[in-house]
Image (tube, rainbow, N blue to C red):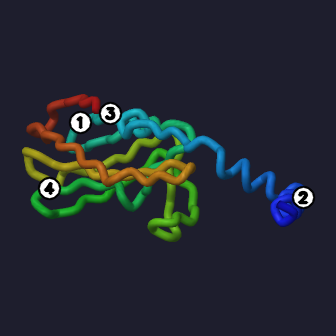
């Protein structure tokens, strides 16, 4: 009994333990579904595909994980609407991250009519990395405008 009282007095005398208890009882962060965290729309016009994201606050996209693939050939974006933010990421090390609104433009002139897959991946600042996303897109014949929402 005497030992229990001593431990109780000892624990209550150190204020740093209060922060520890707060962390142990803090609620887990709630994460958005992928389509809400990274809403995406696509525009295709004149051999150019533009992917538009309006990423939710507290979430970001990886620059190096945004690209197109057709027949195992990777096509990187030729331009970005934003410069991106250089940061350290637990999963990939030093990266360029895009927060908020982003448009990535791809030159389709080296691709053929048919299916192309847009790859992208993002994370939440609170610690969740989403799995890589893939969106199948049909490339129309040249000069046929085609908006796509996802």
Answer yes or no: do the residues labelled 2 and 3 have beta carbons within 8 Å?
no
Label whose residue precedes the other's in the sequence (4 or 2): 2
Label whose residue precedes the other's in the sequence (3 or 4): 3
Note whether residue 14 is visible.
Answer: no
Above or below: residue 62 compared with residue 100: below
> Residue 57, percent across and down?
56, 38
Identify the residue position indicated by label 2 in the image: 9
Note whether residue 12 is visible.
Answer: yes
Q: Real-space Cα distance between discs 4 and 1?
A: 18 Å
> In screen coordinates, is 135 left or right of 18?
left
| Disc number lying in front (2 or 1) | 2
| Disc number lying in front (4 or 2) | 2
Identify the residue position indicated by label 4 in the image: 70
**Residue at position x 78%, y 53% from top?**
19
**Residue at position x 20%, y 30% from top?**
146
**Residue at position x 50%, y 48% from top?**
124
Q: Real-space Cα distance between discs 2 and 3?
A: 60 Å
* Kind of element beneath mark 2: helix
- Residue 109: numbered disc: none
Residue 51 position by quadrant: top left
> Residue 79, percent across and down?
40, 52
Q: Real-space Cα distance between discs 4 and 2?
A: 67 Å
Circle 3 packing at 10 Å, graded few (<14), some (14-19), many (20+), is: some
Identify the residue position indicated by label 3 in the image: 41
* Kind of element beneath mark 3: strand
Q: Real-space Cα distance between discs 3 and 4?
A: 19 Å
Identify the residue position indicated by label 1 in the image: 45
């Amino acid at each position: 009994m005497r030992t229990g009282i001593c431990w109780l007095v000892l624990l209550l005398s150190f204020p740093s333990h209060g922060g520890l208890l707060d962390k142990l009882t803090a609620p887990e962060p709630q994460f958005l579904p992928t389509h809400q965290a990274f809403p995406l729309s696509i525009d295709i016009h004149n051999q150019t595909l533009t992917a538009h994201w309006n990423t939710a606050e507290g979430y970001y996209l990886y620059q190096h994980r945004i690209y197109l693939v057709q027949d195992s050939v990777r096509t990187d974006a030729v331009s970005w609407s934003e410069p991106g933010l250089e940061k350290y990421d637990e999963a990939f090390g030093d990266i360029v991250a895009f927060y908020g609104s982003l448009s990535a433009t791809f030159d389709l002139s080296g691709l053929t009519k048919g299916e192309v897959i847009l790859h992208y991946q993002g994370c939440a600042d609170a610690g969740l990395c989403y799995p890589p996303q893939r969106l199948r897109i049909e490339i129309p014949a040249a000069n046929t405008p085609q908006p796509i929402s996802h």
